[in-house]
Image (spheres, rainbow, N blue to C red):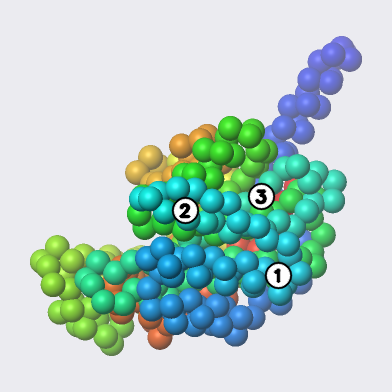
Amino acid sequence: MYSAKRICLIILLLNSILFLLPAAGISETQKEIAREVKKDNLRSTIDKLEKYKERSSWENQDRAISWAVEEFRKMGIDPWTESYKSDGKVWRNCFAKIKGKSNPSTLIMLTAHIDSISRVGGAAPGADDNGSGVAVLFECARLLLKTPLNKSVQFCIFTNEEQGQKGSKAFTREAREKSQNIHSVINVDVLGYNKIIAPTFWQAFFGNNSFRNRAKVVLRTVQNCFSRASVGRDAILIAGRPANANLVKIAGDKMRQVIGITVKERVGNECGCGDEGSFWNEGYDAIYIISLYENPYHHTTWDRIENIDFNFLEKATKGILATIVYLANR
């Protein structure tokens, strides 16, 4: 016979294992919310951001943050901004939160950066990097507002990601100092490109004025060819460090179950050049989700809305929504 103490230990162990395992299937709530994703909303957000022509200067990043604040207000979510100093200026990040019902102090975070950059001069429309991520964030916010959630979901729009993740670093340092209970973080970035090669490939190649940049265009296209041959069309990459392996698996399972696209999971220490790295540096559980296909127009003036695959972006949004709903209610 087992003693009462041993039985209690077995029960606690089984509960711990069940907590760590991803859910076996998709709930009706997750299916229903996924059906509500609108491509037109995704397109509208990217179109508005692209019209800034560049979002690298202080003036345009600040204007874009003000626009984001108003977008949250239109949805009925109360936003706020937090400031940090860099290069003699005061910059702002934008935040909004949907409060959970039973565990409101625990946060699930969806993050995206709003700035853009061109390494070849000229405009920096940033349709994919990172208009696509901001579009996904806003569509998730719109739909999660009418979804039952136990934990709170906080949306974070950061400035100056392209300048060394200054905005997210300022936020995560303060979050750690305040001991914020951040349970999981999903960073979305460059999610809209889904091609091996586009008709304007040569424009991107010859438009780059250095051998290094031209080599990057060629390398990305070659990598896309190999990826297409091995994994097929409509492929997402979900990545994190070894400490984030369970979160990577949860997100991967949800993406596959909801939208049926190819998901490649990557766990390793080479990741971290985006805002997810700021959360890792402070010990938070964070992953990033991007398109597996590398955009040859990345950081150029040709990163435009006509190169976005909105069918693919819609699918990605559905999978991210399902992941957040699961994490907020597990």
Q: Position of residue 178 (x, y in %)?
A: 63, 34
**In the image, residue 83 above or below residue 63:** above
Would residue 162 be seen by someone viewing this image from the given angle?
yes
Residue drawn where x is 68% and y is 61% of the image: 79
In the image, 62: left or right of 39? left
Q: Which residue is mark 3?
A: 108
What is the C-alpha distance between the residues marked 1 and 2?
Answer: 23 Å
What is the C-alpha distance between the residues marked 1 and 3?
Answer: 20 Å
Q: Which residue is mark 2?
A: 90
**In the image, residue 303 above or below residue 179:** below
Q: Which residue is mark 1?
A: 73
The quadrant of the image that shows the N terminus is: top right
Foreground residue among 285 and 104: 104
Could you classify mark 3 by the number of other residues whose Cα lies within 10 Å: few (under 14), some (14-19), or many (20 or more)? many
Amino acid on which the number 2 mark rests in the picture: Val
Q: Secondary structure at mark 3?
A: strand
- Mark 1 or mark 2, which has the lower sequence index? 1
